[in-house]
Amino acid sequence: MRVGPSQDDIRRQNLGALLRHVHVHGATTRAELTTALGLNRSTIGALTADLAGAGLVSEGTPKETGRAGRPSLVVRPESGRIYAYAYSIEVDRLRAARVGLGGAVLDRRELDRPRGLVATDAAPLLAGAAKEMQQSVPAGSICVGTGVAVCGMVRRDDGLIRLAPTTGWVDEPIGAALGAELGIDAPITVGNVADVAAFAEYARGAAAGCDNVIYLYGDVGVGAGIIAGGRRLTGHGGYGGEVGHMKVVRGGEPCECGSRGCWETEIGEHGLLRNAGRSDARGRESLLALFDAADRGDARASAAVRQAGDWLGFGVANLVNIFNPEMVIFGGTMRDLYLAAAAQMRSRLNANALPACLEHVRLRTPKLGDDAALIGAAELAFERLLADPLDVG
């Protein structure tokens, strides 16, 4: 005999839906919540009272509305009190932030990351940043979790970094190592940086309101976060989105993944600097210097940027044909390349993409900027709270 959800189950689902709405959309009136969630006013009132009692939201009167009658109360997330720690492990830097409910970055730290640093070396540095931030946390605040964004292939089940060619990591248990340094037993959620940045831009950034999005992210390598039908598309084990390893040149340049001719060998850091005759340089500052030289008319730099822009458009056209997105967002070094080579990129995209797939695509840079990875990592940590707000504590 099939048994439906209990009243308690329904209540918890409604609490989660209300808290999620306020978390994503910010301060919202009770009247707006009634419309958005399809619940009656008394139910909304009871739910907000429960969330306020748990310290997750606050209610207050709005500013002057200019309308007659009693104004609807405004529900706000308790951003200063409820927070998560977020980390972004990138090729040349480590970043840490304390992110409040509602997506506000309350505090942050950034450290240089020597290339070759393994997880057991990175974890103490990240934990140290968290302990610094902890000193300024107001009394009575609650940390609801920890999320980590990493450039690499992350196993969904346990957050193990199976392979991160650009950092040299293989089977690195960053979540366990960081948890040991922080001295916490709660699970630490780990995700791919492009995937979590895509989710952040979809939830509260440039792609808000779009259900089909590709977030193309570059560091040394290239990856993509994909939102399809409003859901993160990460594949069976969590390894989806490794678009930088599409094969585009038969017998092309060697890639750090062990193969040859991958897309990132043409548009990633190494390919760009190699084609500009700057193979000895590395890092984002070197790329920015290259783009600046191209902008000032340096012939070899300009040729390298045009060539990379052509390859960028080639790959994006394939992605557009396969996934039919509403929006493509260029983050990390892909933002820099897109802005430097927009003409070549658009020309190749227009030539290679199917007209029906191309006609509604918008090309954008991240609204959240570099914070997309940190805010996305925090979203991983907030997920348990949003699924069951009564489990906070």
Image (tube, grey):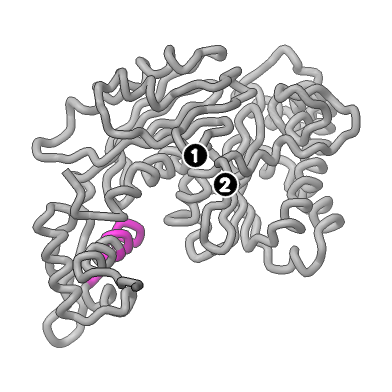
Crowd class of label 2 (few under 14; some 14 to 19; many from 20; radius 10 Å): many
* Res 361 → quadrant: bottom right
Where 334 falls versus 304 (above or below)? below
- Under mark 1, the amino acid is Arg
Q: Residue at x 62, y 59 (%)?
A: 327
Left or right for 309, reference 64: right
- The secondary structure type at the circle numbered 1 is loop
Q: Quadrant of the C terminus?
A: top left
Crowd class of label 1 (few under 14; some 14 to 19; many from 20; radius 10 Å): some
Q: Residue at x 31, y 64 (%)?
A: 17
Total numbered labels placed on residues in the image:
2
Residue named by callout 2 = 234
Q: Residue at x 44, y 24 (%)?
A: 174
**Can you give x and y, in whole percent of width and height, for residue 171 in the image?**
54, 22
Report the span colored magenta: 17-29
Alpha carbon separation for disc pair 1 and 2: 9 Å
- What is the number of the mark on residue 156? 1
**Can you give x and y, in whole percent of width and height, for residue 202 in the image?**
49, 56
Q: Quadrant of the N terminus?
A: bottom left
Q: Is residue 28 covered in magenta?
A: yes
Give whichever of discs 1 and 2 has the lower sequence position.
Answer: 1
- The secondary structure type at the circle numbered 2 is loop
**Can you give x and y, in whole percent of width and height, for residue 98 in the image?**
29, 36
Left or right for 139, reference 366: left
- Under mark 2, the amino acid is Thr
Pointer 1 with pointer 2, Cβ within 8 A: yes
Q: Name the main secondary structure of what is drawn in magenta.
A: helix
* Res 357 → quadrant: bottom right
